Amino acid sequence: MAVKCRLKSLHLPEEITYKYIIRPRHCTEDIHRRMYKDGCSSDELPETPPYDYSEESRLRNQTHTQFPVIEICCGTGDFLCSYALSEPQSSFIGIDWAMPVIERAAKKAYSAHINNLLFYCGAAEDFLEYDFKHLLFSRILINFPDPWPKKRHLKRRLPSAELTVLLAEKLVPEGLIVAATDLEWLHEWHMINFNSCRALIPFPGSTRERPFDAYQGRSSYEIKGLNRNRLIYFAVFKKRNRSSVF
């Protein structure tokens, strides 16, 4: 998948790339492009098997847990590297669409000798529905996603109502989903989508407070917002502790 990015590739050593970066096996965008070019249906294309998370972690000499923490739109990894270092008993996966961004995150993880963190370079939907479709998560974090403020870009804004339902399905019971932003109108968008999902209930606490003790790192986007004297908002919801919620 070729994605435009203002950053240039770091051309990391293979040692770092292999230890930290997972490339998508399934790419919906490439599949649609190929279907259009070749005039074939999705049934005619070869299926890609999902990743085995425990096996991938073992091969890369990474510790792992049954229900990792994921961050969607992890960027260059400032927040997630800090979080992974603070909880060495947990495991983490960062998701972002641009390889130069993921490379910078992997370089930071390598420099900090982090061994409980992987990065996936691809779309969140492909990660959740295909490449890691059998995996459930203890926490799902969306820190300062691109707001996509224009009406024509509405479908790209995270999380959509459809993606919210998918994220809730991937949470373990009592698991948390957190969306952080320094834009009040985007915070309201997060609250509306989370409240509309029957599987989720609001987590006690203020929308201005960091949701749990380990949530101490700051992404570059949060730092920019604070430097501009913006308020930080957190939408924090918990998955209901029962299965038949949809």
Image (tube, rainbow, N blue to C red):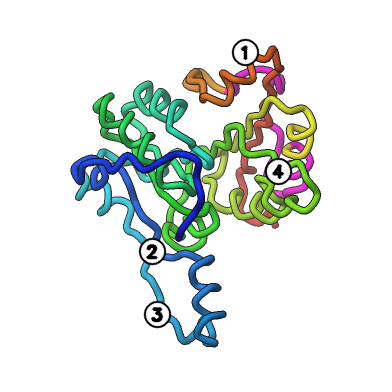
Type of amino acid under label 2: Arg
Crowding around mark 3 (Cα neighbors within 10 Å: few <14, some 14 to 19, many 20+) is: few
Q: Which residues are magenta?
A: 191-211
Quadrant of the rendered structure where residue 112 is?
top left
Distance from disc 4 to disc 2, alpha carbons, whole Å, reads 27 Å
Q: Nearer the viewer, residue 28 or 242?
A: 28
Type of amino acid under label 4: Trp
Q: In the rendering, at what x and y percent does residue 204 appear?
A: 69, 25
Crowding around mark 1 (Cα neighbors within 10 Å: few <14, some 14 to 19, many 20+) is: few
The residue under label 3 is: 46
The residue under label 2 is: 25
> Does 36 sit above or below residue 187?
below
Quadrant of the rendered structure where residue 8 is?
top left
Q: Which image quarter is the N terminus in?
A: bottom left
Q: Nearer the viewer, residue 244 or 136?
A: 136
The residue under label 4 is: 148
Residue located 32% across and 58% down the image: 52
Q: Nearer the viewer, residue 191 or 187?
A: 187
SS at badge 4: loop
